[in-house]
Amino acid sequence: MKKHNKMAGQYVSASLLVALFAVLPVSGCISLEAPDEPIVIELNINISQEVVYRLDNDAKALIDDNEDIF
Amino acid sequence: MVDLSTKVSFALVPVAAVALFFSPAVVSAQSMTYKSAKAAGVIGEKPDGYLAVVNGGNADARRVVDSVNIKRKAKYTELASQKGVTVQEVALSTGCNLITKLQPGQKYMTPSGQWKSRDGSPPERDARCP
């Protein structure tokens, strides 16, 4: 009976250990979750340059169509 | 007599045109227009697509600048909403072209805020200009 109890105790502690190892990586993953707020990368200068380049022909047309103010 | 005076007045046309172009003094307060002030270098183009008075100027020059800038902003706003971009982006893109189109002797502001006259060399423009 005593032996059986000891065996059972070993079994319990071993399964606890396994459970602990099984949970550890999972909890690790949870702690690495992305924040709720979106990650903002400041690209204003690059966006502006791309847009300015894209608007070049429209700007030329605007100047030609409104000679009195350009 | 009529023929002679007609010939004389026609002969004076290029002289008057040259004088008007090269002399800022000819741009009197009463007759100052956007084109004459710009040709005389009294007002100049800024990198942001708007006009400014060069080196102080006078009240008439400021009136011309304000009047044209309001009309420009209206056009920039219209195009910006059509294209889904900001007014500043349209204005900057137009400013790039306006400075390039200036005639030699006309004034523009460099990105560092200094007034310069256009000459044969490429103008100093915003780094984002194409």
Image: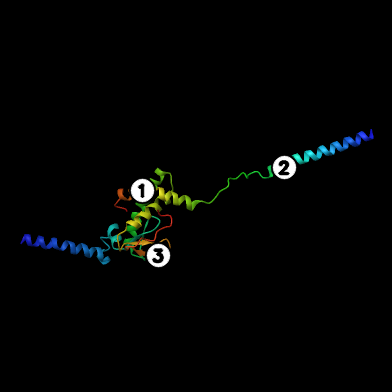
Q: Which residue is mark 1?
A: A57
Kind of residue indicated by mark 3: Gln
The N terminus of chain B is located in which quarter? bottom left
Q: Earlier in the sequence, mark 2 or mark 1?
A: 2
Are both tags, 2 and 3, on one chain?
A: no
The three-letter amino acid code for the residue at tag 2 is Pro
Question: Mark on residue A25?
Answer: 2
- Rendering coords of residue B36 (x, y %): 27, 60
**Label 1 with label 3: CB-CB less than 8 Å:** no
The amino acid sitting under disc 1 is Asn
Secondary element at image label 2: helix
Neighbourhood count class around disc 3 (C-alpha, 10 Å): few under 14, some 14–19, many 20 upward:
few
Secondary structure beneath label 1: helix
Disc 1/disc 3 C-alpha distance (Å): 27 Å
Calculate the distance from the C-alpha at mark 2 to the C-alpha at mark 1.
56 Å
Pointer 1: residues within 10 angstroms few (<14), some, or many (20+)? some
Callout 2: few (<14), some (14-19), or many (20+) C-alpha neighbours within 10 Å? Answer: few
* Image location of residue A56, percent across then percent down: 38, 50
Q: In front of the other: label 2 or label 3?
A: 2
Q: Which residue is mark 3?
A: B114
Answer left or right for B106 relative to A16.
Answer: left
Residue at mark 3: chain:
B
* Quarter assignment of residue B116: bottom left
Check the image and report above or below for B97 versus B104: above
Which residue occupies 40% across, 46% down?
B80
